[in-house]
Amino acid sequence: NAGVTQTPKFQVLKTGQSMTLQCAQDMNHNSMYWYRQDPGMGLRLIYYSASEGTTDKGEVPNGYNVSRLNKREFSLRLESAAPSQTSVYFCASSEFGLDNGYTFGSGTRLTVV
Amino acid sequence: SQKIEQNSEALNIQEGKTATLTCNYTNYSPAYLQWYRQDPGRGPVFLLLIRENEKEKRKERLKVTFDTTLKQSLFHITASQPADSATYLCALQFSGSARQLTFGSGTQLTVLP
């Protein structure tokens, strides 16, 4: 049982390049989330998908887009990377009604130079 | 906007003692409050969830209290061990928020042998 799988684990981009961060969960959870984590600022929500077919903006959505491809997969796209997007990105999933909290992936460490 | 404060960025205690971490929030009371553990280079791992109508919850050596009057949660680790050394995050979820979590920036706990 893998839980939440994120790829890649590390990435270096040049300013202006684009890339997609992939996330897949195998727990049949309805809700999925993308967070970024920066030193001293905690985890901040970028986008979330409450259920398959829906996506909504979180606290810091500018410069990002998402796709809920199916119930398992939720991708995050940077169309034109900027140095301010250097961060560690975490994908998570959860199921409403269960007291099990979120399950997080191991993260993608992204550096934009 | 909601603000979450966790006491001091770092806390050092001696092995065997009880560690107490604090999470304070402003404005509206959450429906749920959760605690996570994060090790370096890893994603957060869910520990405990407490609801707004619960005063206390326990799990093995962990205890969480929730005081909606003080707008505060306390997280206790009894008989602490060096393996408990990690960063602990509190997170709040509000009713009707599609289970979005707002995270504090965390407290780094070091248990000294």
Image (tube, helix red, strand yellow):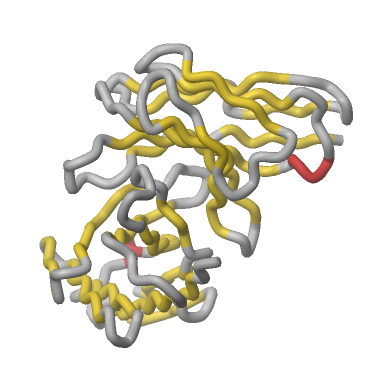
**Residue at 88% in and 30% down:** A15
Q: Nearer the viewer, residue B104 or B84?
A: B104
Q: Is residue A73 above or below residue A12?
A: above
Above-or-below relation of B46 to A69: below
Q: Position of residue A79 (x, y in %)?
A: 76, 23
Q: State how many labels appear.
A: 0
Q: Is residue B52 above or below residue A6?
A: below
Furthest toward the bottom, the residue is B70
Q: Is residue A24 left or right of residue A77?
A: left
Image quarter in which the N terminus of chain B is found: bottom right
Extreme-front residue of the structure: B96
Residue at 53% x, 52% y is A43
Can residue B95 be seen in this snapshot? yes
Residue B39 in picture, x, y percent from top left: 44, 52
Direction from residue B53 to residue A22 in the image, left or right:
right
Is residue A62 toward the left or the right of residue B82 in the image?
A: right
Q: Quadrant of the C terminus of chain B?
A: bottom left
Residue B45 percent coordinates (x, y): 34, 47
Residue A106 seen: no
Q: Position of residue A1 (x, y in %)?
A: 25, 21
